[in-house]
Image (cartoon, rainbow, N blue to C red):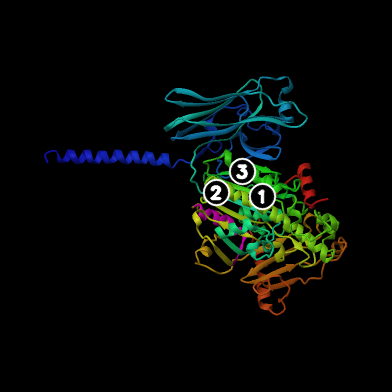
Amino acid sequence: MKNKPLFFLNLILAGLALSLINCQKSNVSEFKTFRLIDHLKKENIIQSPLIDSPLAGKDSFPLKSSRMNDLGIGDNPFLLKRKLRHGSRVANILFSPPESHFKFHTQIPQQSLLEFRIGLVRDQNSSRKTNLSDSREGVVFLVTLQKQGREKIVFQKHLNPPPATEGPSLIESAHRIQLPSLPQKTTLSLQTKGETPYFSYWVNPVIYQADNKNSNVILISIDTLRADHLGCYGYPRDTSPHIDSLAQEGTLFLHSFSTSPWTLPSHVSIMTSLFGVHHQVYTSKQKMSPSLLTLADVLRKNHFFNSGFTGGGFVSAQYGFAKGFDVYHEGRGGVFHMNSAELIYKSFSNWLESNKGKRFFLFLHTYQPHNPYVCPHPHNTRFLEENPKWEHLNLLGYLGGKSGIYKKLSESEKENAVGLYDGEIHYLDQHLIGPLAAKLKEMDLFDDTMIILTSDHGEEFFDHGAWDHGHSLYNESIRVPLVIKFPHQKFRGQTITSTVSLVDIMPTVLEEMNIPASDIILDGQSLFPLLKGKKTKDRMFFADIKGNVLNSHIPQKSSINQGKYKLILNQEFRQQDLDFFTDPPLNIPQIELYDLVNDIRETNNIAGQNPSLTQALVQKINTLVSQAKKRRPGETEIDEKLREQLKALGYIR
C-alpha cells in the first residue's frame, strides 16, 4: 500500500473525531437537572436592587421567608435563595424583585424542559417599601436564550399585584417550556421588570429531561402505627390487606425500632439517620440544626425532585423538615380532617399527574391513626361490638389529658378504644396505601419505585398500665412496622428477623440509589448486608425520652439492646410529678431487662438474674451519651396555626 502512513493517519483522526462525538453525546446523555437556584453565584447577578444594600434588614425580604440551607445550593449571594411559606406550603424561591437580571451558562440537551412558577407576594414588609395599594403596574417576567450574540425570548408574562388583604397575599402561575436543543454552552437569563420594588420571585426554576424510567423513592410515615396491629405482623383482625400485600411484594422487617415514642424526635432520626443523643431535638421548642444533612438534602443534590405532603404539627417546616425539599406541604394529613389519609393520597396523586417524567422523592405523612379516633363510617365501626359506648373517641380528652394516662378503664371501654384505632388503620389502608400502589401501577411507576412504609412510634392501650404514647419505651410504643418494596422486585417476599432501627432507612435508600454515603455522619447502617444474607446479627437500637417533655411530668428514660436483650433505664418520678397525675403510675423499677425472643410483650423483668449483662448495657448507654457529638439544636416559635394543630393532637392544652 503506497499511502500506508496517510491511511493510518486518517484512521487515527477518524477515531479521534468519533471519540469526541461520543464524548459529546455522553455529556449530553448524562445531563439530568440544572437547578438555577443552585447555580446562582455573584457573577451570575447582572442586576438586583439588593446589590447596593447587601446588609439590608429583614424588611428587604418577604415576611414569611427564610434563607435556604439546603445541601448543594452553594453560595447564597445577597440571601436571594430563600424558602417562602404561604398557607400550608413552603417552597424554594429565587427572590427577584425588579429590576433583577440573572444569567446562567449551560447546555440544553434534546427534549429539555424549563419548569418554574412565578409569583408576587404582598405582606407587611412589602407594604412598608412602597404604597402597593396605589400601584397597578405589576411585574414582567422574562426568560431569554442568548448564543453568539443572538437573543431569543422564550417566555414573557405580566403579573398584576396580588389583592390587598389584611394578611399576606400572593399570586402565582406555573409554567413548563420546551427548550430548543443547544448542546454547546448557551446563556439563559431570568429577568423581572417593573418600576415598583415588588416582592417577586421564581419558584424552583429548573431545566430537566423527562424520563419515565427513573428510580424513585417514596417514604410513607403512618403516625402512631403499632406494628402488632397489622396482619403482616400476625394481628388476627383484617386491618391492613394493602399493607400486607405491599409486604409480600417487598421485604418485611419484623423487629424494627424507633428512636423515640413521640413524633418530633423520631422523625428527625428518620430523616437524618441520627439517634437523639446526636441530633439533640427533644422538646417542642427545638428544631433541627441547619447543619444537619437530611435524606431529602442528599437526594435533591443527586437530581431528585423532592416534595412532602404531611400532617404538619410536629413534622411542620417550622421544625426544619422542609430542608432539602423543593416544595413541602403540611396540614392535609392532620387531625382536623377525619379523612386525612385520603386527602394525602389525593395530593400525592395530583402531584404525580403534574410531574410525569421526573425522578422524585416523596415524603407522605398522615396522623390518621393518631388520637382522636374519628375516621369515616363504616371503617370506624368495622371492629366494634354491637351498641358500643363510642363510635368516635378523643381518648386523651376522655382521660382528662396527659394527667389521666394512668386511669384504669373497663375492659369493654378498652376494647372499644382498640376497635376504633383498628378502624383508623383499616381506613388508611383502604384510602391511602391501596390507591397509592394502584396509581403507581397505572402510571407504570410501581416497578421502578422504592417504597418505604413505617411509623414514628406506636400507641399503648394499657399494656403496661397506661394509655397514649410518649411516656414509655416498651414495644407497644417503639416497635414499629418497616416494609421496603425495592425496585424491580429485588428482595421480594423476604422477611428479616434481625433487629433494626429506623436510622437504617437513610443509608439503605442511598445505597439503593447508588449515592455514596462515606462522607456523611450516620448512626444507621444500610440494610443490604441483612437482605443479602451476609450478616444476620441484630443491629443496635437506641431510644430515649427527655424528662418532662411537653409538660408530661414523665422522667427521663433510655433503652438499648444487645441482640435479643432489651434494657430500659428509668429515672425515678419526683413527688411533684406524681402529684400531677389523677391516677398514680405503676411502680416500675429503675432498670428493666427483657428477652424479646421469649417475652416480646415485656412481662418478665430478668435484670436481677443477669447482673453482668445488665451492667454492660447500662454502661453502653452511659458511653453512648457521654461520647455523643452533641449538636446544638435550633429554636422554633410555635405560631397560632401550629399551636392549634398541637392542641388537636392532644400535645398541649
Query: Would you name the residue on which mark 3 appears?
Result: 349
Query: Would you name the residue on which mark 1 appears?
Result: 431
Q: Which residues are magenta?
A: 498-513
**Residue sitting at 57 percent across and 65 percent down?**
496
Which residue of the protein is positioned furthest toward the front in this rendering? 386
Q: Amino acid at mark 1?
A: His
Asked if labels 2 and 1 touch by Cβ distance under 8 angstroms, the answer is no
Query: Would you name the residue on which mark 2 appears?
Result: 441
- Measured as percent of width and height from the top left, residue 325 is found at 61, 44
Q: Amino acid at mark 2?
A: Lys
**Residue sitting at 66 percent across and 19 percent down?**
137
Asked if residue 280 is positioned above or below residue 12 in the image, the reply reads below
Which element carries disc 1, helix, strand or loop? helix
- Measured as percent of width and height from the top left, residue 278 is found at 65, 57
Which element carries disc 3, helix, strand or loop? helix
The answer to whether residue 103 is magenta is: no
Asked if labels 3 and 1 touch by Cβ distance under 8 angstroms, the answer is no
Q: Earlier in the sequence, mark 2 or mark 3?
A: 3
Q: Earlier in the sequence, mark 1 or mark 2?
A: 1
